[in-house]
Image (cartoon, rainbow, N blue to C red):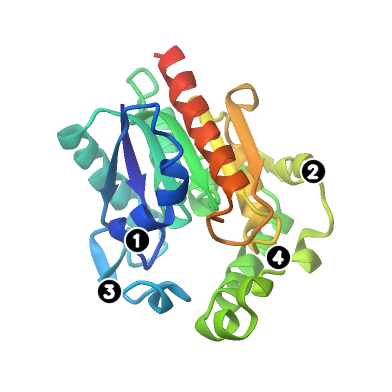
Amino acid sequence: MKVICLHGKGTSGAIFRSQTSSFRAKLPDQSIEFDFVDGPFEGSAAAGVDLFYPPPYFSWWENDTVDDVRAAVARLNEYIATNGPYDAALMFSQGCVLGSSALLFHQEETPHLPAPFKSAIFVCGGPPMRILEELGFHVSAQARERDVASRNALAQQADNSAILTQGSNRWTGLESIDGGLSEEELRREIQCPYRIPIPTVHIYGFKDPRYAAGVHLSAICQPEKRRTYNHEGGHEIPRTLNVNYAIAESVRWALAEGEKCV
């Protein structure tokens, strides 16, 4: 089986390989080729990343506009056409925006053709809000406000000084904006004319400022084909044994479900 791996903004394929090594090591029973791809734009490191990993650092686009995301999706589709097919996509943060955008555009424009990949594993990701609104999804004002506030909070909680002074205690989520809403209440903040139809896994932590974004991303996927897992941490992939086994099992599920849907 073959899995395309899309890293977060200001990291790289090599960094994502390292970040996922612990749970991938729990998949020895399956023959899986993980293809870690670099974004096309070299730039600065994501908050806190340069403390642990040397450059270069890449992103999938330079400006967060609909046109730039469309161009990134076009590049991704070209890469898949050349190097695929892929049984699944494993994505983190900005990589989730890219992968979910590719699936949304496919569903909107060419639903009669096979999707870019058969299943998707989203880690600490959020939906592409501007893309959703362009495609006719209704995003509530509260969801838009929370999206902006969570990005600002993430930059503060993930930066170098927070890591050096607070360590793992820096992750405090976004309680003032999330308002104690349940996951189902958060999902209802986005009204969907259609949903991503392939099997999906959504991995997020309630201490992540982008926690609600992860729940919102699950809202635009088919309820009967999605699985969620709260790792209870921040904007990261915890390397504890229980989390590693849980994520590995979710990857197995996604690959198996993807094969059923062919």
Q: How far apart are marks 2 and 1 (CA)?
A: 34 Å
Label 4 CA crowd tier, 10 Å (few <14, some 14–19, many 20+): many
Picture residue at 53% right of the left edge, 55% below the top: 237
Q: Which of 122 and 79 is in front in this view?
A: 122
Q: Mark 1 points at which residue?
A: 15
Q: Residue 155 carries which label?
A: none
Q: Which of marks 4 and 3 is nearer the N terminus?
A: 3
Badge 4 marks a residue whose secondary structure is loop
Q: Which of marks 2 and 1 is nearer the N terminus?
A: 1
The amino acid marked with disc number 1 is Ile
In this picture, residue 159 sits left or right of residue 50: right
Q: Mark 3 points at which residue?
A: 55
Residue 147 locus on image (x, y percent): 62, 61
Picture residue at 72% right of the left edge, 69% below the top: 172
Q: Which residue lies furthest to the right in this view?
A: 180
Label 3 CA crowd tier, 10 Å (few <14, some 14–19, many 20+): some
Query: Which tag is nearer the camera, tag 4 or tag 1?
Result: 1
Query: Which tag is nearer the camera, tag 2 or tag 4?
Result: 4
The amino acid marked with disc number 2 is Glu
Q: Name the residue under label 4.
A: 173
Residue 78 locus on image (x, y percent): 20, 40
Query: Which tag is nearer the camera, tag 2 or tag 1?
Result: 1
Q: Earlier in the sequence, mark 4 or mark 1?
A: 1
Picture residue at 46% right of the left edge, 20% below the top: 256
Q: Which of marks 2 and 3 is nearer the N terminus?
A: 3
Label 1 CA crowd tier, 10 Å (few <14, some 14–19, many 20+): many
Q: Which of marks 2 and 4 is nearer the N terminus?
A: 4
Q: Name the residue under label 2.
A: 185
The amino acid marked with disc number 3 is Pro
